[in-house]
Image (tube, rainbow, N blue to C red):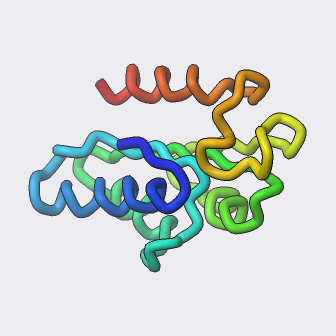
């Protein structure tokens, strides 16, 4: 699952929920700028998905200039978790959500999406 902004919280939450109903149906979640917008703690979902029999990877992309997403993504340390921080100079506009996907972003988010998909499939 892949999502941006409120959708990035939704993909993580949805992945965990789906796996409670159909174990291992969701293979992982890639989140662009989560902010705990759905009132479920993103870090707790990362831990829950990491504790499954087959731990699910969660990757988080955020701009350092986006305080909500930086606070959510920047402090999680779990084996199934990877964060990618972008400087304000490497993103478009405010660097939130889909604005992180620009050719000048390093590492290139589109290449990372392909890497994530290759890893889980």
The answer to whether 72 is drawn above or below residue 23 in the figure is below
- On the rendered structure, is 83 left or right of 120? right
Quadrant of the snapshot with the C terminus: top left
Which residue is nearer to you in this view: 90 or 78?
90
In the orientation shown, which residue stands out farthest toward the left? 22
Residue 74 location (% of width, % of height)? 69, 57
Residue drawn at the location 63% of the way across and 65% of the way down = 72
Counting from the top left corner in percent of width and height, residue 98 is at: 60, 43
Query: How many numbered markers are drawn?
Result: 0
Q: Position of residue 111 (x, y in %)?
A: 57, 20
Q: Quadrant of residue 13?
A: bottom left
Left or right: 45, with 101 as reference point? left
- The residue sitting at 78% across, 24% down in the picture is 104
From the viewer's side, name the closer residue of 57 and 3: 3
> Looking at the picture, does residue 102 appear above or below residue 8?
above
Residue sitting farthest toward the front: 93
Residue at figure coordinates x 45%, y 29% from the top left: 116
| Residue 86: image location, x then y, percent | 77, 41
Relative height, residue 70 to residue 2 (above, below)? below
Q: Quick one: which residue is furthest to the right in this view?
A: 89
Report the quarter where the N terminus lies. Answer: top left
Closer-to-camera residue (94/46): 94
Asked whether, in this view, residue 107 is left or right of residue 21, the answer is right
């Amino acid at each position: 699952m892949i999502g941006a902004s409120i959708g990035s919280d939704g993909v993580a939450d949805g992945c965990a929920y789906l796996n409670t109903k159909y174990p291992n149906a969701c293979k992982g979640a890639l989140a662009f700028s989560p902010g705990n917008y759905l009132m479920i703690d993103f870090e707790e979902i990362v831990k829950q998905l990491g504790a499954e029999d087959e731990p699910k990877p969660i990757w988080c992309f955020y701009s350092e200039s986006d305080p909500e997403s930086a606070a959510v993504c920047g402090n999680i340390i779990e084996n199934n978790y990877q964060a990618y921080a972008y400087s304000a100079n490497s993103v478009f506009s405010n660097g939130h959500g889909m604005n992180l996907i620009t050719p000048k972003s390093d590492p290139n988010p589109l290449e990372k999406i392909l890497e994530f998909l290759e890893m889980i499939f």
